[in-house]
Image: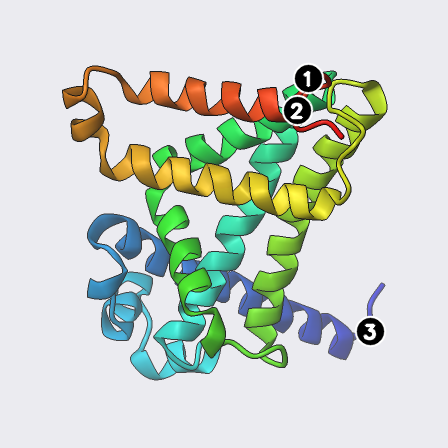
């Protein structure tokens, strides 16, 4: 049994963590409803039902709150990727499942995709010593490692060609490829249909091209 003071300290820590999550929940709900540009600290305080002064005890400014949402978005993405990958045996299938999980997240939770996009665009403003920036970078690294794990499994089981010189570089390339596909299908759906095809067809073709580049027998094999 914990001594009284330890118990009180633990309860305070739990209460602080709970309130922090409630603040992030409030900010996230506003983000999803109206977009990040219209979110203000006053609105977050009202949505979370606490004073503006208390809000600043937990988050120093709007940018600090944005980083908390980015961290949550990246953790959610990693969890979805890992669940998707686990349902497939071959590495190439895991890799496609991971990519499709990224697309589904952008469709289900577009504010998460936007939050990560803003974080990458403003990366020069974040320092390695900033605690929340470091937490976001660590979460991003875990997403990257999920992609690398799928690639490594593919090389081991033969579904991905063995001549890849750098799996980390390949994982970044895969991320950049899917990131671009998501931006196109999310902003140009009308134009895509006007050109006589569908978003689904474009997505399937993107995966087919990427699989072809990675599978044994590719013209890229050295």
Q: Which residue is mark 3?
A: 3
Residue nearer the viewer, 46 or 95: 95
Does 77 sit above or below residue 49?
A: above
- Tell me the number on the disc at residue 94: 2
Does 144 sit above or below residue 124?
A: above
Q: Give the residue displayed 34% in from the left and 48% down from the top.
A: 111
Q: Is residue 30 left or right of residue 1?
A: left
Q: Give the residue displayed 58% in from the left and 31% down from the top.
A: 98
Label 1 crowd bin: few (<14), some (14–19), many (20+), radius 10 Å: some
Determine the secondary structure under disc 1.
Answer: loop
Is mark 2 in CB contact (under 8 Å) with mark 1? yes
Marks 2 and 1, the one that precedes in the sequence: 1
Residue nearer the viewer, 182 or 140: 182
Q: Give the residue displayed 46% in from the left and 78% down from the top.
A: 125
Q: Which residue is mark 1?
A: 88
Alpha-carbon distance for marks 2 and 1?
Answer: 6 Å
């Amino acid at each position: 049994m914990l001594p009284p003071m330890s118990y009180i300290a633990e309860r305070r820590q739990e209460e602080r963590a709970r309130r922090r999550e409630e603040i992030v929940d409030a900010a996230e709900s506003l983000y999803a409803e109206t977009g990040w540009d219209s979110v203000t600290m006053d609105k977050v305080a009202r949505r979370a039902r606490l004073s503006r002064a208390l809000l600043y005890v937990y988050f120093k400014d709007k940018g600090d709150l944005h980083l908390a949402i980015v961290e949550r978005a990246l953790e959610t993405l990693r969890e979805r990727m890992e669940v998707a990958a686990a349902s497939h045996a071959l590495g190439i299938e895991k890799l496609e499942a991971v990519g499709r999980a990224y697309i589904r997240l952008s469709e289900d939770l577009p504010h998460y995709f936007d939050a990560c996009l803003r974080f990458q665009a403003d990366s020069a403003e974040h320092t390695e010593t900033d605690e929340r920036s470091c937490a976001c970078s660590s979460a991003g690294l875990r997403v990257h490692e999920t992609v690398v794990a799928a690639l490594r499994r593919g090389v081991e089981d033969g579904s991905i060609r063995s001549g890849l010189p750098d799996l980390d570089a390949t994982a970044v390339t895969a991320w950049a490829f899917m990131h671009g596909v998501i931006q196109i299908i999310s902003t140009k759906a009308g134009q895509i249909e006007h050109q006589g095809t569908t978003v689904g067809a474009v997505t399937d073709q993107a995966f087919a091209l990427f699989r072809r580049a990675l599978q044994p027998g590719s013209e890229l094999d050295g």
